[in-house]
Image (cartoon, helix red, strand yellow):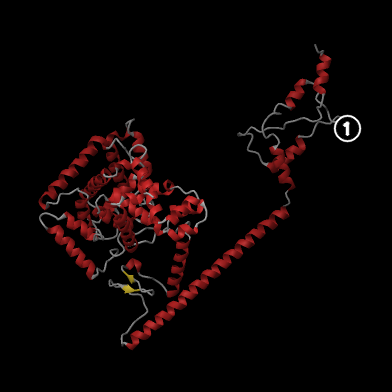
């Protein structure tokens, strides 16, 4: 057995090298560690105590040793000391010199970019001026007077590049130099899809019907055909679908959507009574179920709806109005209560917006982006709400397996999209496989939201014109639209050479400036794919 003297000798061994360091306890009296401040503490407080003879005082008792080494086994006990040493020894001149070099290089790159932009704008401006001079000379030869000023008449006016101004909102304002700079900027934005430029407000109306439209002879003829079909005692729905496939005029879109969705009967005499009955039925649901939104078994559903509504088209002021958000909350909650197999799923909130906008147009003539819905009569608002609910319900009835547990409908459609793309464009398919991009990573949203997150709302409305006209448009034809949409970006996809670049592109495709023409081309390509593959299932597989 060891004696007390032996114990004392044991605890005195190797005490010159004491492990551990002072550990902070963060709180009101002990703020987080500051290496610069702590450096002085280390210098002043970490030195061993000195005795008058000049030698460091050694720990002579177990209690003293324990108090010094109580944190000997703490992880990272020397981190504070190392940080303090680094902060103390860092040369401020080296830091400033490095920072100045970074700033100088960045400035040079910015200046070079500005110079390139200026050169591109100057070249386009020169080409425009030459083209304009040629036009003026031709007009003078023909004896016609012309003026270079922008026309704000309702008739379409030609732009410098030969396009037509279809509305006041599309007319260029300012000098040719401004227009050239704007086009150069737009070209850069489109060449960099991972940095999209989002306008303050995305116009929701058709590009050829915004503002005060100047209807062409062809558009007037199509509108007359729609009105003739709708005016009969029994609407020919097959003929209405054929007309609607290429787009529906804004003036007749509300009644056409209600008919094609199955909300209204084809018989004209029964429509008014049907509307009254369905609207009363909806508000009966409100009275019966809406007060239960705070019940324990419904509060989670309502809370999720309440969170998602402000995120719906946040850049469009219309959808940020309190009265509109309350309408959406009622529509989504009642739908979720009446469809317990799926309940509310994130993404369904987006599907209300096209119906709501179209049915608002039934009561107003102006644009709807900044329209104050509180200026409408209460009866009109109630009609819009009920009609939006029933038409959304009809849509979801055909794709409800997209939103049931595990969302099997979306899983199947994404797999079908992958197989279809591998057949129609093997290069794109192999390219994405090479960089380990899974279709589910980007196409899940395409199926869940019906491309509403990828396209401006005005394009979605035009797309849904065709979906309403196409048999199983939302459930079946949408697959071919997604395939055509993916292949549409073939060049941009093949230009990306890593996973991150591909995912940024596919989740931020530059469609903000799309209009009816781009959507029509997309739909035509989708129809071609459907014609080639829908009735030939073996084409899906190798």
Q: Is residue 498 left or right of residue 465?
A: right
Q: Quadrant of residue 213?
A: bottom left
The image shows residue 193 at horizontal and vertical percentages of 46, 58
Q: Is residue 455 visible?
A: no
* Residue in the picture at 26% in, 54% down: 358
Q: Residue furthest right?
A: 53
Q: Closer to the camera, 541 or 369?
A: 541
Observer-nearest residue: 487 or 423?
423
**Residue shown at 36%/77% (left/top)?**
149
256 vs 115, nearest the viewer: 256
The quadrant where residue 37 appears? top right
Percent x, y for residue 201?
A: 37, 58
Report the residue marked by disc 1: 54
Q: What is the x, y in percent for residue 40?
A: 74, 40
Label 1 sits on a secondary structure element that is loop
Measured as percent of width and height from the top left, residue 510 is found at 42, 59
**Quadrant of res 30:** top right
The answer to whether 416 is drawn above or below residue 138 in the figure is above
- Residue 25, can we see it? yes
């Amino acid at each position: 057995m060891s004696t007390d003297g032996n114990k004392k000798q044991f605890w005195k061994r190797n005490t010159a090298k004491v492990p551990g360091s002072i550990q902070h306890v963060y709180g009101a009296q002990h703020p987080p560690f500051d290496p610069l401040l702590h450096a002085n503490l280390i210098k002043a407080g970490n030195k061993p105590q000195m005795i008058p003879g000049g030698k460091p005082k050694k720990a002579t008792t177990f209690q003293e040793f324990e108090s010094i080494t109580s944190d000997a086994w703490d992880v990272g006990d020397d981190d504070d000391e190392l940080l303090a040493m680094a902060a103390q020894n860092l040369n401020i001149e080296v830091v400033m010199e490095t920072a100045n070099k970074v700033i100088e290089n960045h400035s040079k790159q910015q200046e070079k970019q500005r110079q390139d932009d200026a050169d591109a704008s100057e070249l386009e401006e020169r080409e425009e001026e030459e083209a304009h001079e040629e036009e003026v000379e031709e007009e003078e030869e023909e004896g016609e007077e012309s003026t270079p000023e922008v026309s704000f008449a309702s008739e379409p006016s030609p732009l410098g590049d030969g396009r037509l101004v279809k509305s006041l909102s599309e007319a260029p304002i300012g000098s040719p130099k401004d227009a050239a700079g704007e086009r150069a900027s737009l070209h850069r934005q489109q060449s960099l899809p991972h940095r999209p430029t989002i306008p303050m407000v995305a116009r929701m109306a058709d590009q050829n019907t915004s503002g005060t439209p100047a209807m062409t002879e062809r558009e007037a003829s199509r509108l007359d055909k729609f009105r003739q079909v709708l005016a009969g005692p029994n609407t020919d729905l097959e003929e209405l679908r054929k007309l609607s496939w290429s787009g529906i005029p804004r003036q007749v879109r509300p009644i056409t959507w209600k008919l094609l969705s199955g909300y209204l009967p084809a018989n004209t005499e029964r429509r008014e009574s049907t509307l009254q009955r369905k609207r009363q039925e909806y508000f009966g649901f409100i009275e019966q179920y809406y007060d239960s939104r705070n019940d324990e078994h419904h509060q989670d559903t309502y809370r999720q709806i309440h969170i998602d509504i402000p995120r719906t088209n946040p850049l469009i002021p219309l959808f940020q109005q309190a009265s509109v958000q309350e309408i959406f909350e009622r529509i989504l909650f009642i739908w979720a209560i009446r469809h317990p197999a799926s309940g509310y799923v994130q993404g369904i909130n987006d599907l209300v917006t096209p119906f709501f906008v179209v049915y608002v147009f039934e009561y107003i003539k102006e644009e709807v982006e900044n329209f104050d819905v509180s200026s409408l009569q209460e009866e009109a608002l109630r009609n819009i709400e009920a009609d939006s609910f029933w038409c959304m319900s009809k849509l979801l009835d055909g794709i409800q397996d997209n939103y049931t547990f595990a969302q099997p409908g979306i899983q199947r459609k994404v797999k079908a999209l992958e197989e279809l793309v591998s057949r129609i464009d093997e290069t794109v398919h192999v390219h994405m496989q090479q960089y380990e991009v899974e279709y589910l990573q980007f196409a899940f949203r395409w199926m869940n939201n019906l491309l509403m997150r990828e396209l401006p709302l005005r394009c979605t409305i035009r797309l849904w014109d065709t979906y309403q006209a196409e048999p199983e448009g939302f459930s079946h034809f949408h697959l071919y639209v997604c395939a055509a949409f993916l292949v549409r970006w073939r060049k941009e996809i093949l230009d990306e050479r890593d996973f991150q670049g591909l995912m940024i592109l596919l989740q931020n495709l530059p469609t903000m400036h799309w209009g009816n023409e781009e959507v029509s081309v997309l739909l035509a390509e989708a129809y071609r794919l459907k014609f080639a593959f829908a009735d030939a299932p073996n084409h899906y597989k190798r």
